[in-house]
Image: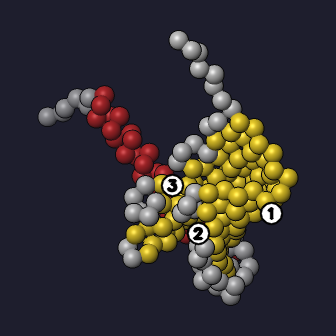
Amino acid sequence: MVKKVKGRHLLGLLILLVLLGLGFVFMRGLQTMEPEQILERVPENVDLALQKFSYTETQGGVRRWTVQAESAVYDRQNETTQIEDLQVIFFDPSGQSEQVILTARQGRIDVAARYLEVWDEVVVTTDDGGMLHTERLQYRDDEKLITTDADVRYESPGMLILGRGMNLDVIRRTVNLRDEVRAWLRHSLKKAG
């Protein structure tokens, strides 16, 4: 007894054959790459290299901050991690909501010292709408303090502040600009009525 093959069965069989073919090509590609070739892709003096890196600092089971990056390279000798295209999220004291978000193109973490340094297109955003732009800054977890000696531009609803050098207290959410400070306040005029 001969059955007619329906179009959807033929399509399913075709998809299965394509998947098997792709699987074969993929497995064959893995077999042709020698372990030495894989290791050549990892930079020298690197103990561990990761893509899509994420690290969360906790205290007493409560999230304090999280670092996420596209790539991370750990150097055991110096106990530092170089990271690229990163985002750091600072949480409120309960560890439930995001208070401050920091983004940058490059960074370095010293886990033992609980120190983070970032540079290249640095932006710090607060949950109340404030945004700080600079080229380089550091975060010291023991002080809960973000600092820089570079030029900064801070914008929030109602104001624009420019200056050089800054301290930003993550817990108190206070910003202290050190030098060459200029500020502009925006206000709306209410019509009497």
SS category of the residue bearing label 2: loop
Q: Residues within 10 Å of mark 2 (few under 14, many from 20)?
A: some
Which structural element holds mark 3?
strand
Q: Is residue 127 left or right of residue 38?
A: left
Residue most extreme to the top: 193
Q: Which residue is rendered at x = 69% and y = 32% of the image?
A: 186
Q: Is residue 162 above or below residue 87?
A: above
> What is the CA distance from the residue labelled 1 to the residue labelled 3?
23 Å
Q: Residue at x 64, y 36 (%)?
A: 158
**In the rendered image, which quarter is residue 78 located in?**
bottom right
**Visible in this render: residue 13?**
yes
Q: Which residue is mark 1?
A: 149
Q: Amino acid at mark 1?
A: Asp
| Residue situated in front as seen by the camera: 20 or 193 | 193
Rendered image: mark on residue 99: 3
Q: Which mark is residue 144?
A: 2
CA separation in Å, label 1 and label 2? 17 Å
**Residue 4 lies in quadrant:** top left
Q: Earlier in the sequence, mark 3 or mark 2?
A: 3
In the image, residue 123 above or below residue 83:
above
Residue 152, percent across and down? 77, 52
Sooner in the amino-acid sequence: mark 1 or mark 3: 3
Residue type for callout 3? Gln
Which residue sits at x=60%, y=73%? 143
- In the image, what residue occupies the spot 39% across and 58% down? 96
